[in-house]
Image: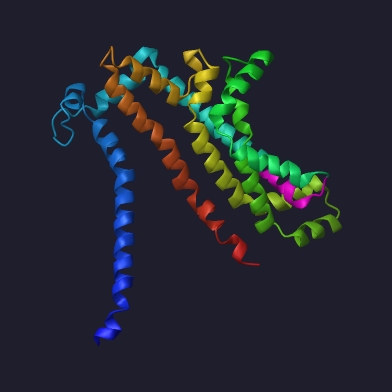
Amino acid sequence: MSATDSSPLRPKLLGRATVNVVVAISVLYTLLPVLWLVLAATKDRDALFSSDLLSLGGFSFGQNLTDLFAMDGGLYGRWYVNSLLYAVLGAAVGALVSVACGYAFDKYRFRHKEKLFGLVLAAVMVPQTVLALPLYLMASEAGLVNTFWAVFIPVLFNPFGVYLGRIFARGYVPDEVLEAARVDGAGELTTYVRVALRMLGPGLITVFLFQLTAIWNNFFLPMVMLSDQDLYPVSLGLYQWNSAASVSPEYYPVVIMGSLLAVLPLILAFVLLQRFWRSGLTAGAVK
């Protein structure tokens, strides 16, 4: 191969190497904190303070796990159940609401439709922390502060989920299929539930995963709404324990172990649902 033939390959190889380096740095940036969390969860308090995570000494995984669920009368188990209720149930209901709203925006004509959808898009850009105080005042007027519903009801409505629902409805649900169902005598609700919702399955899973991640990691809203420890989610409970660890160092190992367990539901959800989610990426390409 001549020099002129090999010269075009150099920029390609250089660009590929640059991309590989950037990807490798990104992977390390993502995985190193997780690796530290896994290693730290296996160590006792003395090993944590000595920063001796890579040695075989101080192994205390089982004891840390036992202490986690025994600390403060087993509060962590209750927090975990609360988070599952807030996140899994809230994400499921919220995904159904979001996809139904997106479907309505795409398939029906009604007055001021695009203006209302513009408000939905504007709401996407509003940080959730800005809404915490107004939501607290509304919950206070309704008598819902320091109850399960004060956290559960606000997470059911997700403007970004509505936006995604409209995108998926436009890409996955042909108007011809809906017209055929109506010609066969199906009502609007029957058409949506039996025809459209099945086609929107990948979109529903996608919105569910986004909702699940956001609700599971939700911190500020429960902190504003709740004062009863029995209603705390995992995020707020671990924050409280971490604050107490400066006075009582025995909290450090259980906070780390609790943080490790708190990551597992999200990983499990993505692993179990990824085939449904990934199938939606190419569903619109086949007619």
Q: Residue 154: x percent and y percent?
A: 62, 28
Judging depth in this view, the residue of 240 and 86 nearest the camera is: 240
Looking at the rendered structure, the number of numbered marks drawn on it comes to: 0
Q: Is residue 129 magenta?
A: no
Q: Residue 83: x percent and y percent?
A: 49, 27
Magenta range: 99-110
Q: In the rendered image, which quarter is residue 47 located in?
A: top left
Q: Quadrant of the C terminus?
A: bottom right
Name the residue at 56% across, 14% down: 146
Q: Does residue 154 appear in the picture of this structure?
A: yes
Judging depth in this view, the residue of 182 and 210 nearest the camera is: 210
Q: Please, is residue 173 above or below residue 151 in the view? A: below
Is 163 on the left or on the right of 43, as rendered? right
Is 101 on the left or on the right of 58, as rendered? right
Q: Does residue 149 appear in the picture of this structure?
A: no
Q: Residue 147: x percent and y percent?
A: 58, 16
